Image (cartoon, rainbow, N blue to C red):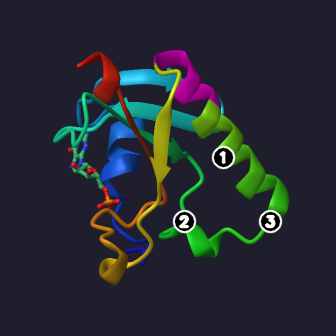
């Protein structure tokens, strides 16, 4: 018996246990379409290395790679966009596996 925490929803998506529309994947990140889009284009960029919330990431390189990946994924779909991170329940976070929202497409909807 282990005390390992239950895998997060996004870990289960990364493991292909739960289906998702994957738009990007590399060794360290995956990007999927949000199941309940709040914009014509709504993607989630998710590090495979689990942290609960953005402020748990303290290494500059890791933080930088997350944002560079979000910008790369955004640029594959949009010329203009909004990047959002909800941090904590009071910040609107519902899934406690750090992720960056990429929102856009209003101008071409
Ligand atoms: P948060 O509120 O944690 O910043 O954002 C979580 C996001 O995950 C929400 O926009 C929500 O629509 C999305 N989401 C929740 N469950 C699923 C799911 O099973 N699949 C996908 N693709 N997105 C999900």
Asked if residue 15 shows in the view, the reply is: no
Measure the alpha-carbon separation of dots 3 and 2: 12 Å
Tell me residue 1's x, y (percent): 37, 74
Left or right position of 33 against 46:
left
Residue identifier under label 1: 67
The stretch of residues the image draws in magenta is 72-77
Q: Residue at x 23, y 19 (%)?
A: 109
Q: Nearer the viewer, residue 65 or 79?
A: 79
Mark 3 element type = loop
**Disc assigned to residue 51:** 2
Dominant secondary-structure state across the stretch colored magenta = helix
Tell me residue 36's x, y (percent): 16, 41
The image shows residue 45, relative to residue 25, as above or below, that is below
Snapshot quadrant of residue 72: top right
Mark 1 vs mark 2: in front:
1
Measure the alpha-carbon separation of dots 1 and 3: 13 Å
- Give the number of marks: 3
Q: Residue at x 62, y 35 (%)?
A: 71
Tell me residue 85's x, y (percent): 46, 60
Lower position in the chain sequence, tag 1 or tag 3? 3
Question: Is ligand 1 less than 8 Å from the beta carbon at label 3?
Answer: no
Q: Nearer the viewer, residue 63 or 47?
A: 63
């Amino acid at each position: 018996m282990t005390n390992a925490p239950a895998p997060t929803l996004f870990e289960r998506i990364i493991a292909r246990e739960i289906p998702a529309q994957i738009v990007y994947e590399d060794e360290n990140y995956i990007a999927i379409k949000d199941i309940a889009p709040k914009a014509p284009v709504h993607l989630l960029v998710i590090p495979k290395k689990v942290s609960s919330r953005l402020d748990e990431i303290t290494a500059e390189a890791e933080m930088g790679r997350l944002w560079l990946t979000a910008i790369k994924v955004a640029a594959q779909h949009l010329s203009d966009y909004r990047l959002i991170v909800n941090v904590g329940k009071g910040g609107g976070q519902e899934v406690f596996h750090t992720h960056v929202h990429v929102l856009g497409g209003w101008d071409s909807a």
